[in-house]
Image (cartoon, rainbow, N blue to C red):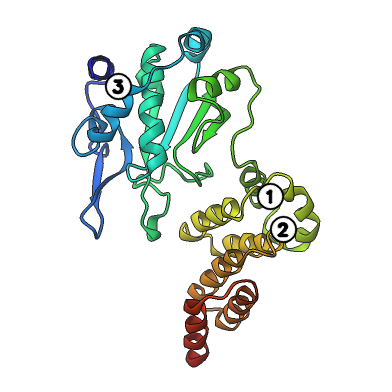
Amino acid sequence: MKKTLLLFSFLIIAAPTFSQTFNQEIVNTKGTANLTGKINFEKLNTAPYNKWFSENYDSYAPKEEIINAIKTDLQSYTITLFMGTWCGDSKREVPRFYKILNTCEFPIDRLTTVAVEADREHYKQSAGGEQEGLNIHRVPTFIFYKDGKEVNRIVESPKTSIEEDIKDILSGNYTPNYSGVTKMNTIIETLGTDYLSKNSENLVNEFSSISESLYELNTYANVLFFAGKEKEAVEILKFNTLLFPNEADAYVSLANKLVITENISDAIDIYERSLKLQKNEKINMKIKELKNSL
């Protein structure tokens, strides 16, 4: 805890005042407090967040040889960190990340930390909208910038350890997790959903080698959907059923979104296709309910 307090003291010296938009706290329907928008180290060291933050910070011992290798070059970068105070991966990795930055004597004013929400209406979104346009589909996400341009990012969890992943990023030899999502985001942003729809069958071969699980694109589509990009999300979920044609959950996820967008007939068809792969009484009941609504 001693070293934790050292970084806290440094933070106070480096940035004595903050806007009132920092450290916004929300309480969900279960009475659990979480943070949203820009937050700082001081807030993470107050209850209830310090229970996991301080423990994981103090228990982590970065590899000294890696710290020595990255310490100097890291100073020329700026970093934006997206996390969820409700997220298990964030609770584990974010304290470790702060410990590494502190050990490297990284200027804390070159780090921006943003908390995103977990509820469906604001899924992976922050109160200040800092996530917009940055393809934040998993947390934590650590984005490294140099000269104002993104160099690379660590997504959800490191491939080796955070400090070793940072070393690989600085050396230009790093591919982040979920490269399929990165590829899909590029297609959606540059070529559009019509391109994806017309070229889905050809793209399946490209994605099959980089997508390990249906949940990669599924989570990405959920983020887009609840950010108001329903057309893009549905098209990606349709593609996901081609990529994972034998996975019932791929069809269920698509059908769920079709129900929300009131495409009831299509949703029934997709639900029925999922039942051919896996029996599910809840889906049977859902189909009956939807048919009665027509």
Instruction: Locate residue 155 relative to residue 242 in the image: left or right.
Output: left
Question: Residue 130 location, x and y as percent?
Answer: 42, 41
3 or 1: mark nearer the eye: 3
User: In the image, what residue occupies the spot 36% across and 57% down?
Assistant: 119
Foreground of the two, 99 or 257? 99
Q: What element carries label 1?
A: helix
Res 271 quadrant in image: bottom right
Question: Residue 283 location, x and y as percent?
Answer: 51, 77
| Residue position for label 2 | 196
Other residues around mark 1 within 10 Å, as few (<14) / some (14–19) / many (≥20): some
Q: Which amino acid does label 3 sit on?
A: Asp
Q: Which amino acid does label 2 sit on?
A: Leu
Q: What element carries label 2?
A: helix
| Residue position for label 1 | 187
Question: Residue 37 location, x and y as percent?
Answer: 33, 42
**Decide: marks 3, 1 in contact (CB < 8 A)?**
no
| Residue position for label 3 | 58
